Image: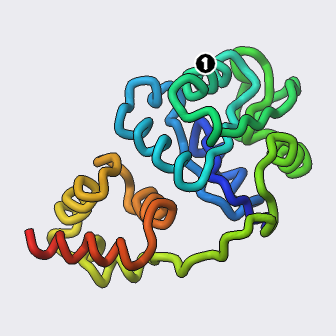
């Protein structure tokens, strides 16, 4: 597993699954063209870019470039890297037929191609980043503060995302990733304390 300092932005869950087997990094999905109308997620990406930096890794087809170009104009240029995979004809194993343009997407690329794309983009790989890893906030922490496993957990998560200025409709796993990206344990517990006081 290769550690990457920056968060990686991909189009969908299959891309995310492929990368999760290769790198230790936060991976954020755009939900395809969903990002074009999701102001909350775009704001979240801006925050992550400022805090940690982003690597945009979209498919090499027309749709991938529409998404990339949209993000290129919407995110801070000095905090975003662009990783490109080559045009390779074919189809992913899970699909019955090739995509519209007949090219493999991120999910169909080999380990070597993906690592080369990240390196060529300038991503900081395998511990080259200077900052020591902070103690991660875990699912157990979420449970301990009532964000999971309780009768009001969903409402508490919604209130928490509002207080933390995060997208409201994040899954629990995505919220956990976001919390670890954007705050330390002290800030997390401070917000949970405020949640209890409301």
Q: Quadrant of residue 1?
A: bottom right
Q: Nearer the viewer, residue 60 or 194?
A: 194
Q: Which residue is mark 1?
A: 66
Q: Is residue 173 visible?
A: no
Residue 186 lies, in percent from the top left, at 38, 78
* Vertical arrangement, residue 57 with respect to residue 174, above or below: above
Kindly indicate the quadrant of the structure image that contains residue 143: bottom left
Tell me: residue 196, above or below residue 123. below
In the drawing, does residue 52 fall left or right of residue 151? right
Please name the residue shown 56% across and 35% down the image.
76
The colour scheme is rainbow
- Looking at the rendered structure, the secondary structure element under dot 1 is helix
Relative to residue 121, is residue 39 drawn left or right?
left
Q: In the image, residue 113 lies at what x, y percent?
A: 89, 43
Name the quadrant containing residue 142: bottom left
**Residue 180 vertical placement versus 32 (above, below):** below
Residue 121, image x, y percentages = 80, 40
The location of residue 126, given as percent across then percent down, is 81, 66
Q: Residue at x 38, y 55 (%)?
A: 171
Extreme residue toward the left, this view:
198
Going 35% across and 72% down the picture, which residue do you hit? 188
Residue at left offset 17%, top offset 70%:
195
Within 10 angstroms of label 1, few (less than 14), some, or many (20 or more) residues? some
């Amino acid at each position: 597993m290769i550690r990457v300092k920056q968060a990686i932005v991909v189009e969908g869950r299959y891309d995310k699954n492929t990368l999760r087997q290769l790198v230790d990094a936060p991976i954020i999905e755009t939900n395809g063209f969903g990002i074009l109308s999701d102001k909350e997620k775009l704001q979240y990406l801006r925050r992550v870019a400022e805090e940690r930096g982003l690597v945009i890794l979209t498919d090499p087809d027309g749709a991938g470039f529409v998404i990339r170009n949209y993000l290129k104009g919407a995110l801070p240029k000095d905090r975003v890297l662009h990783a490109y995979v080559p045009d390779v004809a074919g189809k992913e194993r899970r699909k019955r037929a090739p995509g519209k343009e007949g090219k493999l997407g991120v999910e169909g690329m080999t380990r070597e191609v993906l690592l080369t794309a990240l390196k060529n983009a300038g991503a900081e790989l395998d511990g080259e980043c200077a900052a020591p890893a902070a103690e991660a906030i875990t699912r157990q922490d979420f449970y301990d503060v009532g964000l999971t496993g309780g009768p009001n957990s969903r409402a508490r998560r919604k209130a928490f995302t509002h207080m933390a200025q995060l997208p409201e409709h994040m899954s629990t796993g995505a919220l956990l990733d976001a919390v670890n990206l954007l705050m330390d344990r002290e800030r997390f517990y401070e917000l949970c304390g405020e949640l209890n006081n409301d």
